[in-house]
Amino acid sequence: MAANPALSTLRDAVQERLPAYLADLERLVRIDCGSYTPAGVNTVAEVIVDRLEGLGAAVTRTGNGTAPDGRPLGDLVVGRLAGSGPRVLLIGHMDTVFDAGTAAARPYRTEGDRALGPGVSDMKGGLLAGLSALTALHDAGHHPSVTFVANPDEEVGSPFSGPHIRALAADHDAALVLECARANGDIVSARKGIADVAVTIHGRAAHAGIEPEKGRNAILAASRMVEALAAVNGRWPTVTCNVGVIAGGTRPNVVAESCRFEVDLRAASAAEFAEAEDVLREIVGRPHVADTTSELSVIASHPPMEKSPATARLVSLAQSIAGELGFTVQDAATGGASDANTTAAAGVPTLDGLGPVGGDDHAPAEWLDLGSVPPRISLLAGLIARIDQGL
C-alpha cells in the first residue's frame, strides 16, 4: 500500500464531498425504516449499495431475514473493498426504532447547526459517515482492505444479521462501529451487555367471585416475580434490571390464567452479567404462587463490550489523529448495546461511536451536530488509514 495520505488531504476531500453527504442525509432521514418496516430499510439499502458499488466494492445483499416472532426484516448489505493492510470491518445499521409515518410527521429539518429527524443520529449520520470516509480515502488514492456492513435489524438485537457479523469478525483485524459519538463528543470504548428476556406464567382460570380458591392467579405470580427482579438492581455495581412490558388476564371477574412480561437486564462486565443472568433464571424458575409454572425465552442478547488493551490502543490512536486535526476526543463507557458488543466478544479490537456528534436518540428531539460532520469523518478516514498503528 502507498504511504498513508496526509490528514489535510483527507480533510479537504471530506469537505469537498460535504454537500453530497448532506443531500444523502436528508434523503435517508425522510425514509421510514423502522426495524419492522422492511420496505423502507430496503430503500435505504439501495442507496448504500449504490454508494459502495461506486467505490468499486463487491456487494452482496442477503434477504428473507425474520425476527424471532416471524416478522420480516430488511436486507443485509455487505460491501468488500479489496486492498492491502489490516482487514477492517466497518459496521452501521439502517433501521430505526420509529413506526411508519414518523418521517412524514417529523420530516428532516435544520435548526442552526443541527439536523433533526427520525434516525438522523441513530444512525443515518454515522452510516453515511462511514461511506464518506471511504470516499475520502478513495479520492486520496488510498485503498485499504475494508468490509462495510449495513445491518437491517440492530435496533431489535441483530437477530438476522448477528450471525453474519460474527462470521465476518473472525476474518478481520479490527472493527470500527459507526454509531454516532456521544452528545459531549466522546467515542465509545465499552458497552454494557444486554439480555432482553420474555417470561410467560401459566396459572389456572376460575370465577373470581364464586370460587376464586380454584384459580391460580398468574398476574399475582408475575407481580411477585417483578418485585424480586427489581431487587436485583444494586446487587452488583453495574447491573440494571427493568421490567418494561407486562400483560395478563382477560377480565376482572376471572382469575388470570396467564401473564407475560419482558425484562431488560444489563451489566458492564462478563462476570456480573453471568451472575445476574443466573439470578434472573432462579427467580423466574421458582413458583411464586403455588401450582403456577413459568417459561423464559431470550428475545435478544449482546455480551458486554469491555475495554480491552487492544481497544485502549485504538482509543490512543484516535486521540492522536484528532489532535493532528485540531480537536480533542475522549472515550466513554455507555449502557446501550450495539454490534460492537458482538465483534468485541469475538476477540476483535473494536472501537465505537465513530460517527458525528449526536443526541436524544430514539426520541422526537433526536439531533445531529452538522459542525461535527467534517472533523469526525476526517478522524474516521485517518483511523482507517492508520489502523495498523493501533493494533
Image (cartoon, rainbow, N blue to C red):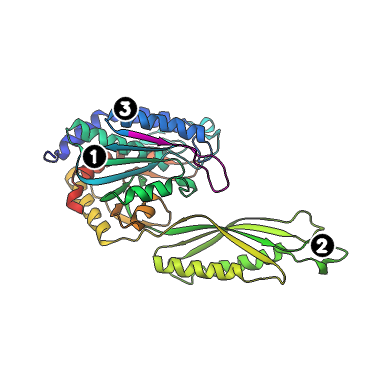
Q: Residue at x 78, y 61 (%)?
A: 205
Disc 3 to disc 1: CB gap under 8 Å: no
The answer for how far apart the CA atoms under marks 3 and 1 are is 15 Å
- What type of secondary structure mainly makes up the magenta span? loop
110 or 70, which lies in front?
70
| Amino acid type indicated by mark 2 | Ala
> Marks 2 and 1: in contact by CB < 8 Å?
no
The quadrant of the rendering that contains the C terminus is bottom left
The boundaries of the magenta stretch are: 59-74
In the picture of the structure, the residue carrying the numbered disc 1 is 378
- Who is closer to the viewer here, 312 or 145? 145
Rendered image: mark on residue 232: none
Comparing labels 2 and 3, the label whose residue is closer to the camera: 2
Report whether 135 appears left or right of 107.
left
Dot 2: what SS? loop
Q: CA distance from mark 1 to mark 2?
A: 66 Å
Spot occupied by residue 94 in the image (x, y as percentages of width and height): 43, 38
Say whether residue 78 is visible.
yes
User: Of the residues shown, which amino acid type is indicated by label 3?
Assistant: Ala
The number of numbered discs placed on residues in the rendered structure image is 3
Q: Which of the two discs, 1 and 2, sits closer to the camera?
A: 2
Tag 3 residue: 20
Q: Position of residue 298 (x, y in %)?
A: 53, 57
Residue 200 % position (x, y):
64, 59
Inter-mark Cα distance, 2 to 3: 65 Å
Residue at x 33%, y 30% (from the top left corner): 51
Residue 167 counted in the magenta span: no
**Label 2: which residue?**
206
- Secondary structure, mark 1, is helix
The amino acid marked with disc number 1 is: Ser
Taking the magenta stretch, the answer to whether it contains residue 73 is yes
